[in-house]
Amino acid sequence: MKIEVLEPHGMCAGVNAAIAKALKLKDVWCLHELVHNEIVIDELKDLGFKFVERIEDVPEGKTVVFSAHGVSPAVREIAKARNLKVVDTTCPFVAKVHEAAKAFAEKGLPVVILGDPKHVEVQGIAGELGVENRCRCREGGKVGVVSQTTMNADEVAKQVAELRKTYDVETMAEVCHATKERQDAVKKFCSACLSSSVSSPFGLLVLGSQTSSNSKRLKEVAEQGGAKAFMAGSMEELKEIDFSGVERLGVTSGASTPERFLMEAVKFLRNVPEHVAMIMDGNGRWATQRGKRRSEGHKAGAKTLGDVLNWCGERGIRYLTVYAFSTENWKRPKDEVEGLMALFARMLKAKEKDFMKNRVRFRMIGRRGDLSSSLLKTIEALEGKTAHFERQFIVAISYGGRAEIVDAMNAAIRKGEPITEETFRNYLYAPDVPDPDLVIRTSGELRTSNFLLWETAYSEYYFTDVLWPDFSEAELDKALAAYAQRHRRKGGV
Ligand code: FPP
């Protein structure tokens, strides 16, 4: 299934501003959900925010937040009478609709509000109107029309046209810019799918809560555009969805959906491995084929490795482990070994700025005692400086899978601890790192060469003939696409 993230998607400026404003406060009550998204609301609850449905339920003198959807003048009056400190996060576009409804009312016009009468935004707008504006409209008479800001834009236009058949309509009915833009992106995606020369069954996934009107409208627009439409408010809901039959899937999110949910969802849908390990083989052959010295091959390989680290980051891969020097590589000619050690030191020093900027944690696995004290100092300084970052780049130097197992066994024996598979893991070089999901080996060799023997028990392998210095972004994507097709049963059925 091909995944396409639609632009624009996700949180609008109004919602962002409302959350930012609320986060500055402590000991607060929110009248209604601040925004219609369960992930955001759960996090605010964890921070101690309290939510009430009636203004009367906010204790006197306390701080109350009015949500992005706005409130009626009556609510403002009660807040004043109860001596509440009001923090108003009403979206400016909603405030404009209140003003328009009030202006129509002041002109004595009956006012039609297009929207869901149960939605708090519509209730707030209705509160601007006196009884005389709520009476039945006279056929042929003048009416003022406003709408909820998160309606289906085409539906609003249709309803206004319908009203024009009977009344003299003065209208300010339009959905907000963010709602319209997101709906337009869905329409564009659907027409692109329909007009594509390779017609494949397509779908549209909306990430947003069931309480979010604009998210539900996106689903509706997708269905009107001919897509099989899906909606998920959380990762749990997403994992329940059956996408079978869909070959092209557009992904969008509602105006109150956090971006990190979209990122997690896309990662899940694309089946991106969490941990990729690489056997960077073929530097020597690459150099020989070009009449160059082997050291030139390693230099070119180091440059490729810098690019690969960035590509993996862009694809949401959390751990990248590379096999840079094995316990067996010490047998190589002295000048090659020394050249490699010098290259490691140079590269790590040169990359420090990038690691800090891109928030990458650097770690080494292998027999530290085999390294020169100056290289080890460079390595450990970098490990210390980057220790707090989440994304990890792990380099295996003087590493052997058998050596790691032996070292782990000896450490366990020293401790006198009985060994199980679980306790054994604690003695590995990087016990907290999850096992690799995917191992990529370049240069056409079809073996594991003593790399991560314990950790790769259930890893998927991808072999390519490409020599490591030529390993490209396209080749990485080929490996990830192959991985995405694998069924990892891990001994199950
Ligand atoms: C295997 O190719 C490659 C190595 C033993 C060295 C890999 C090292 C780098 C790419 C530099 C990485 C730098 C850091 C800081 C980790 P080979 O020499 O065995 O190639 P061949 O099989 O064609 O001879």
Image (cartoon, helix red, strand yellow):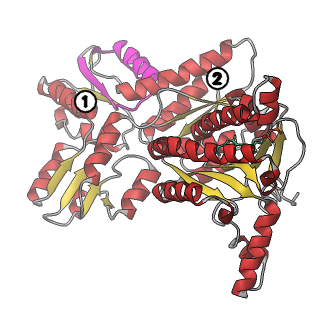
Q: Secondary structure at mark 1?
A: helix
* Residue 117: x %, y % from top left: 36, 40
182 with respect to 394 (left or right): left
Q: Residue furthest bottom?
A: 416
User: Residue 472 sits in which quadrant?
Assistant: top right
User: Residue 145 sits in which quadrant?
Assistant: top left
**Residue 97, numbered circle:** 1
Identify the residue at horizontal 74%, vertical 43% (top origin): 336
Identify the residue at horizontal 37%, vertical 34% (top origin): 12
Residues shaded magenta? 142-169
Quadrant for the N terminus in the image: top right
Residue 113 belongs to the span the image colors magenta: no
Q: Nearer the viewer, residue 157 or 364?
A: 364
**Is residue 317 something one can see in this rendering?**
no
Q: What's the distance in space between the residues labelled 2 and 1, CA to CA?
A: 32 Å
- Label 2, on which residue? 226
* Residue 230: x %, y % from top left: 62, 38
Ligand 1 located in image quadrant: top right
